[in-house]
Amino acid sequence: MSLKMKKSPVLVPVLLLLIAMLSIQSGASLAKTLFPIIGAQGMTALRLCLGTIILMVFLRPWRKSATRTPAPGARGWLVAYGLSLGGMNLLFYMALQTVPLGIAVALEFIGPLSVAMFSSRRVVDFLWIALVIAGLALLLPLRDSVDGVDPVGAGYALGAGVFWALYIIFGQRAGENYGTRSVAFGAMVATVIALPIGVMHAGSDLFSLSILPAAIGVAILSTALPYSLEMVALTRLPAQTFGTLTSLEPAMGALSGLIFLNETLSLLQWSGLLAIIVASMGASLTIRPKGKVKPVKKEEPLES
């Protein structure tokens, strides 16, 4: 009984994070089908705009929380969270124009992986991170197929990874002050940045009713649902745990690309995905609940 009670606070946010990753990769596959019509910039703007509307309706973030009072300067974290959210989405969609979904996600994953590496404190954490690195080495086309990956698209994916790392850091800070409301406010900030770029690129096609149903689906799958679930996980898991668990993203991206976009990977790359899955499972089994760390002889920080 006591063991179950002890693990449940960790397993719940882990499950929510897995659902969020599955949702966001399915949405990315659907979004890529709209690139020929409105481009990556237009799709980013439309996704964030519709996602913000959905979040505003369901979360109603303007209501003041009776149990949470934002700390001084909390708005700065909220704006930073929104900017990182917008940059991550825009650069990732730019990468998807020329890079397969699974590989783009793997390159982007370097961002949260770095958060995990710099935040780790225990030997077992480095064991799982090492396995993730080995998986990425097999997943990425570093040997016989480098010419098949567009370097510009790869650069966009790496840039998205930088914003992903910032999204984790700023998201935790914003969530501590605003809870799930920060998702709606952050999406609104991201929309203000992305919408003018999308209009400049796509023009009137951005407001075509023919693409609205698919765009709403992308907004729900890629913004409203996953970011709400991720915010819950962000405020309940340490940064290194969140970063390591998201190693499942390349696997889910590759599977979504294969199922929905007919994007195939080599045997070595699938082996890399398996290594990443094993690392994620191992990390899940060795998670310590946030704030529940046992006392140690020397004083050390509980989290980064």
Image (tube, rainbow, N blue to C red):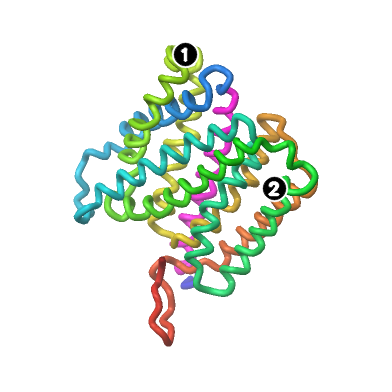
Labels 1 and 2: the sequence-earlier one: 2
Instruction: Give the image location of residue 215, x and y in percent.
Output: 48, 23
Let me know if residue 256 appears in the view. no
Let me know if residue 266 appears in the view. yes
Q: Is residue 152 left or right of residue 183?
A: right
Label ID, residue 205: 1
Tell me whether the residue at label 1 lies in contact with that at label 2, contact meaning CB atoms closer than 8 angstroms. no
Compared with 148, 131 (above or below) is: below
The amino acid type of the residue labelled 1 equals: Asp
Quadrant occupied by the C terminus: bottom left
Q: Which residues are magenta?
A: 4-33
Is 291 a magenta residue?
Answer: no
Task: Give the SS element for disc 2.
Answer: loop
Q: Residues within 10 Å of mark 1 (few under 14, many from 20)?
A: some
Label ID, residue 140: 2
The amino acid type of the residue labelled 2 equals: Leu
Task: Give the SS element for disc 1.
Answer: helix
